[in-house]
Image (tube, helix red, strand yellow):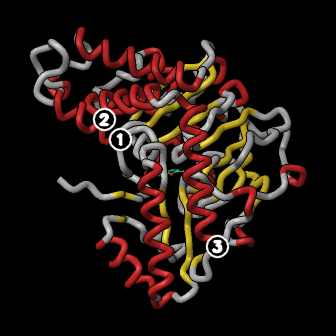
Amino acid sequence: MSRVYNFSAGPSALPEAVLAQARDELIEWRDSGMSVMEMSHRGKFFSVIAEELESDLRSLMAIPGNYKVLFLQGGATAQFSMIPQNLLRDKTKACYVNTGAWSEKAIKDARNYCGVTVSASSEEAKYTTIPDYAGWQIDAEAAYLHYTSNETIHGVEFSDVPDSKGLTLVSDMSSNILSRPVDVSRFGLIYAGTQKNMGPAGVTVVIVRDDLIGYAPKTTPEVFNYAVQAKNGSMLNTPATYNWYLVGLVLKWLKAQGGVAAIEQRNIAKSKRLYDAIDRSGLYHNPVDLPFRSRMNVPFILNDESLDKAFLAAAEANGLYELKGHRSVGGMRASIYNAMPEAGVAALCEFMAEFERTH
Ligand SMILES: *Cc1c(COP(=O)(O)O)cnc(C)c1O
């Protein structure tokens, strides 16, 4: 077996220990006599998996008791519509901060449901920065303020929680959830697809404060209604059972690593090592303003674009995969989520230096 270092932005590398455990339990889970894939989602075995999943996430993120935790389908993309449907209540406006490609998509869908005030935008700066909080246009009549805590494509990350000036704060944390501690009580709603930092694709975590739900209009389909899903333990319809199980294994792995505060230290060290290598070099550069550089997704552009193909081919020959940047940004992107070992980042930095030396 020869597993490579996989820098994919998502679906992305999983801890090898998680894959090994899933392999060992594939045919029979604990003493159930069956595979997790074969279990009734309402049976006694799966209910243990579901309970452990929720309680592990609650303890890892210190989620207060007045928040519901939902495990839904449709990806973060479904939330772009579900959030306005559920959280507008009697209001007709919402505020969105535009810091990159994922913010743009959230804004586009929200416009189908309400008036959108773009409170701040870094579009003119080609999404390489985050506008100073002091200049944000916050409409006191809006139902909530939405922002994307880490822009997966542009490699831009908020280093703290912005001041929403009293508005309910909503955040798309798809690509940096569980990578650093967050104070959940600052938020009305946090959501994340699992395929970046929590497991395989197919589950979307929604953490929502109790008092915000129950106000969706009657036209909202029941599966898209947070209150209905909360009442049914996210099992209004058949959930993605095997994916819940795999996310649960990733959470147990993260606990064994020392939890979110411990993994944050490793994420700081890994990203610093890679940015230092980029900044030291004469061949690569990263366009993002220093305070907003993402610890999770690190884009880097080769000063000579004609070397891109050779770089990718040589990287693969060295066991470093999925480094091609998103087409909208160009160049390269290394996604270094929780599951990327320090040795993977070290191998990438070494390869980059060697490629520069020989080109
Ligand atoms: C990947 C991603 C999404 C979209 O996730 P899907 O599962 O494809 O719907 C949304 N927001 C962010 C920040 C992402 O990284």
Front in this rendered view, residue 334 or 124: 334
Earlier sequence position, callout 3 versus callout 2: 2
Q: Is residue 275 toward the left or the right of residue 251 in the image?
A: right
Which SS class for mark 2?
A: helix
Q: What is the number of the mark on residue 176?
A: none
**Residue placed at 48% from the left, 43% from the top?**
338
Q: Residue at x 26, y 54 (%)?
A: 3
98 and 83: which is toward the camera: 98
Q: Is residue 275 above or below residue 117?
A: below
Relative placement, left or right, of 82 versus 290 is: left
Residue, far top:
44
Q: 230 above or below 140?
A: above
Residue pointed to by mark 2: 18
Q: Determine the secondary structure under disc 3.
A: helix
Amino acid under label 1? Pro
Q: CA distance from mark 3 to mark 1?
A: 30 Å
Checking the image for residue 280, the label placed there is: 3
Distance in Å between CA atoms under marks 1 and 2: 5 Å
Query: Which residue is found at the position 37% from the left and 39% from the top?
Result: 199
- Asked whether residue 236 appears in the rendered view, the answer is yes
Asked if the residue at tag 2 contacts the one at tag 1, i.e. Cβ–Cβ closer than 8 Å, the answer is yes
